[in-house]
Image: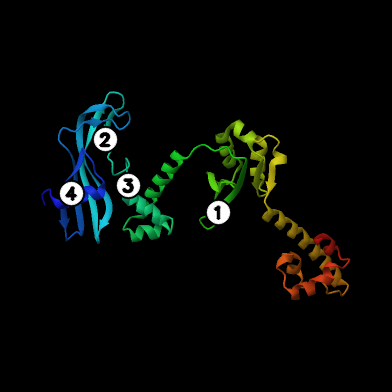
Amino acid sequence: MARGILTQHYEQLLGLAPPWRIGEVELDHEAQEVRVRVELRPRARLRCPVCRAVCGSHDHRERRWRHLDTMQYRTILIARIPRVACERHGVRQVAVPWAEEGSRFTALFEALAIDWLHEASTQAVARRMRLSWDEAAGIQARAVARGLARRKPRLPRSIGVDETSFQKRHEYVTVVNDPEEEVVLHVADDRRQESLEGYFTELGPEGCARLESVVMDMWSPYIAATRTHVPDADRKIVFDKFHVAKHLGDAVDQVRRQENRELRAEGDERLVRTKYLWLWNPDRMSREQWREFAPLRNSRLRVARAWA
């Protein structure tokens, strides 16, 4: 249909401003698509997308972008986009206000997809928004790149380092976070010494010297990386409470097992089936558990001294 109320309506919805305008809107009932054709006004000045210099036209290429659906119909933006010949940057496609370079989706469509990716898996979002998995993952990757480009460099006073497994625990990534600001600072493949050293190199000598504490588990590659890059590292490394408690629990359990074998050989069954009494958090014990545990804790057994 020719330009009229409908084309003006879509111009307002898309937020188009000169030199861009809607040429026509096509409705295809069979394909269940609305096709919105966008065009440049005649004699519009073309600019290099890098340096913004006014340039002459090189050629035109038709491009398509998926936009937010119109009712139950997919909405497709179509435009013949000029390429300019810039003296400094060569042949470049002019920037369009509704989409990022290299994307086949409008910015508004990608924003909706990102909102959904906060709530559901990539596969679920792809299915509901009628995308392929790669398309949904590409939208997410571009959003991450934009966020990283906007992020200002941080010089934290404290960092936390942890490894996270995925792919059925066969793959690991190293994650560095700022516990004070509650933000992720760095993610690297694997959990090797080099995985953490990449962050320290990025932080630089000044940033490493500024660190007051590096919280981690007792993973030796992380310890080695911190000792290599952070001055006075042994004073600044803080082992997280979970792993400290695990090692303490393992030590108490080893004492209990050895002593239990010795006592049972003498016919003493006091430590039989008491493993978890020694490992439970005392603050979470029931009254019944405390009544059972108190005589053992107050005894002269080696495991009681280890527990204390």
Give me the C-alpha separation between circle 2 and circle 3: 16 Å
Residue of label 1: 165
Q: Amino acid at mark 2?
A: Val
2 vs 4, front mark: 4
Q: Which mark is residue 8?
A: 4
**At 17% from the left edge and 49% from the top edge, which residue is drawn?**
7
Residue of label 3: 107
User: Mark 2 and 3 residues: CB-CB less than 8 Å, in contact?
Assistant: no
**At 65% from the left edge and 36% from the top edge, which residue is drawn?**
230
Q: Earlier in the sequence, mark 2 or mark 4?
A: 4
- Whether residue 280 is visible to the viewer of this picture, yes or no, is no
User: Mark 1 and 2 residues: CB-CB less than 8 Å, in contact?
Assistant: no
Give me the C-alpha separation between circle 3 and circle 1: 32 Å
Q: Which mark is residue 94?
A: 2
Q: Amino acid at mark 1?
A: Ser
3 vs 1, front mark: 3
